[in-house]
Amino acid sequence: MSHELATFTGWAATAPGAPLERHSYDPGPLGAEEVEVAVEYCGICHSDQSMIDNEWGNARYPFIPGHEVVGTIVRVGEQARGLKLGQRVGIGWYKGSCMHCGSCMEGSHNLCRTVKPTIVGSHGGFADRLRAHWAWAVPLPAGLDPALVGPLFCAGSTVFSPLLEFDIKPTDRVGVVGIGGLGHLALRFLNAWGCEVTAFTSSLSKQAEAMSLGAHKVVASTDSKALKAIAGTLDFLLVTASADLDWNAMLATLRGKGRLHFVGIVPNAIPTHVFSLIPQQKSLSGSPVGSPSSMATMLEFCARHQILPQVEHFPMSQVNAALDHLRAGKARYRVVLDASR
């Protein structure tokens, strides 16, 4: 099972917004603490699209995207721990961290100041192989379909980790803003968590779909009357959307000690006054993808409740068609590439 490839081959953009084309590169020697994974499936995330288009100004071309990787370990570095050849693992937005700073030592590897993104400064998983530090290659529990789990390693982890971080209780009333790639998983998680779940969407045509995903109520996120009607009722409001909304109206939906939490990248600054926060001790916060430990917890939870992303499959060889599908806003709700096709 352990065999070495002189070059890795994937699908790369050669310029901002360019169609992806076949590209091979020399990965260099395997690091002592790294594992090498033969890619079986890789999800497509909006962050891949942003990097292809160089929206954040940090893409280097040629550039191979892909950071929702599922595959099997084919090589193990001499100092890698806890993993073995043939084991199926997932790798998300990050693939390494320093392992010695305060954040890493307390288990918050995702907050390491030198954390290593999978597709920033290196090639990602739209390829035959990918390497990661052993701690960031998270084993899949039995009972989860490897063809579907890829998006859990980015979208899933991003919306699951706040449930742990902020000690969300089954008795809490929780709102989810945006019913897309992140939001549809948040609805499923929160329903299984035991919460009363309210979905906020700009399109009430998604009402039936939101209810089928786990929402108990659906509110139009742009309807000021509807927002006023639920003022002071929610304990936690998770923003997965990437659109500007009336954030003061959203804050007003929270009860005392409520929290408005962002995991979606909204375009503009959030205009609010401290008096929207202080009198009822409300909080405004944000978080990235979770730590390896929280990902492992999420996967156990998903296996127990059979929570999986709603995905559409494309062959890796049709990656450009898959990206066009995503760009057109047609993905319901995540796209996964099959590396074998």
Image (spheres, rainbow, N blue to C red):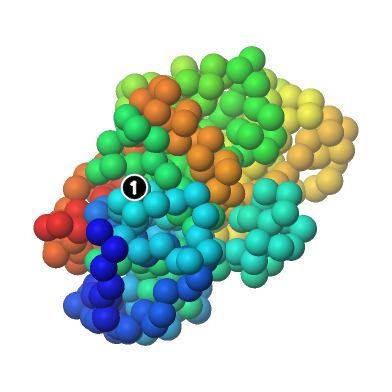
User: How many numbered circles does the render carry?
Assistant: 1
Could you tell me the amino acid type at mark 1? Arg
Compared to 188, does 46 lie above or below?
Answer: below
Q: Which residue is mark 1?
A: 88
Compared to 108, does 260 lie above or below?
Answer: above
86 sits left or right of 28 in the view: left
Quadrant for residue 67, please give it: bottom left
The residue sitting at 67% across, 38% down in the picture is 165
Pick the residue in front: 204 or 104.
Answer: 104
Pick the residue in front: 112 or 78.
Answer: 78
Residue 281: where, in percent of width, then height? Answer: 84, 33
Compared to 313, does 299 lie above or below?
Answer: above
Pick the residue in front: 20 or 118.
Answer: 118
Quadrant for residue 113, please give it: bottom right
48 sits left or right of 104 in the view: left
Residue lying farthest to the right in this orientation? 279
| SS at circle 1 | strand
Quarter of the image where the C terminus is located: bottom left
Q: Is residue 322 visible?
A: no
Residue 35: where, in percent of width, then height? Answer: 42, 63
Q: Is residue 341 visible?
A: yes
Residue lying farthest to the front in this orientation? 78
The residue sitting at 38% across, 74% down in the picture is 123
The residue sitting at 35% across, 64% down in the picture is 75
286 sits left or right of 222 in the view: right
Compared to 12, does 322 lie above or below?
Answer: above
Residue 230: where, in percent of width, then height? Answer: 62, 22
Crowding around mark 1 (Cα neighbors within 10 Å: few <14, some 14 to 19, many 20+) is: many
Residue 30: where, in percent of width, then height? Answer: 42, 74
The residue sitting at 67% across, 48% down in the picture is 107
